[in-house]
Image (cartoon, helix red, strand yellow):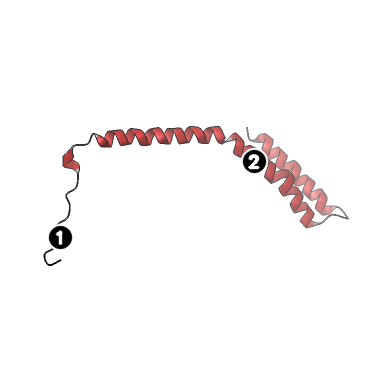
């Protein structure tokens, strides 16, 4: 699944190397090329591809929280901690 983004990053890296080694190219141009053609698009694509998994994880966490909340509401009253008494003189 991740082979396409890795290959695209390789292509963008090679484009940046060509920019840096060109007689009229610069290292700044190579860095901008790599970021704009490589890191930014791949990061966005991977973020959007991960959205369904994050949504499922959030739903599962909410279900776990609601299930734990239901079980704690049925706890006996004896399990509640007693309130501390104030020391004399206060």
Looking at the picture, how far across and down is residue 11, in whole percent? 75, 41
Q: Regarding mark 2 in the picture, which secondary structure is present there?
A: helix
Residue drawn at point x = 67 percent, y = 41 percent: 42
Check residue 44 in the rendering and tell me which mark sits there, or answer none. Answer: 2
Q: Quadrant of residue 25?
A: bottom right
Q: Single out the residue that lies furthest toward the left.
A: 88
Measure the C-alpha gap from mark 2 to mark 1: 58 Å
Can you say which quadrant of the picture contains the N terminus?
A: top right
Give 89 or 21, whichever is nearer the viewer.
89
Looking at the picture, how far across and down is residue 77, in whole percent? 17, 39
Q: Earlier in the sequence, mark 2 or mark 1?
A: 2
Q: Is residue 60 left or right of residue 50?
A: left
Looking at the picture, how far across and down is residue 76, in whole percent? 18, 37
Q: Marks 2 and 1: CB-CB under 8 Å?
A: no
Q: Is residue 42 left or right of residue 72?
A: right
Residue drawn at point x = 81 percent, y = 53 percent: 20
Decide: few, some or many residues near mark 1? Use Cα within 10 Å; few <14, some 14-19, many ≥20. Answer: few
Q: Regarding mark 1 in the picture, which secondary structure is present there?
A: loop
Placement of 14 over or under 70, stated as above or below: below
Decide: few, some or many residues near mark 2? Use Cα within 10 Å; few <14, some 14-19, many ≥20. Answer: few
What residue would you read off at disc 1? Answer: 86
Give 29 or 1, whichever is nearer the viewer.
29
Looking at the picture, how far across and down is residue 49, in whole percent? 60, 34
Please state which of the two labelled residues, at mark 2 or mark 1, is closer to the viewer.
Answer: 1
Check residue 20 in the rendering and tell me which mark sits there, or answer none. Answer: none
Give 84 or 38, whichever is nearer the viewer.
84
Give 61 or 90, whichever is nearer the viewer.
90
């Amino acid at each position: 699944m991740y082979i396409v983004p890795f290959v695209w990053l390789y292509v963008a890296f090679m484009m940046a190397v060509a920019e840096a080694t060109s007689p009229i190219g610069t290292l700044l141009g190579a860095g901008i090329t790599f970021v704009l053609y490589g890191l930014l698009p791949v990061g966005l694509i991977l973020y959007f591809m991960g959205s369904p998994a994050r949504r499922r994880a959030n739903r599962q966490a909410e279900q776990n929280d609601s299930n734990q909340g239901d079980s704690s509401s049925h706890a006996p009253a004896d399990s509640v901690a007693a309130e501390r008494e104030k020391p004399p003189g206060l």
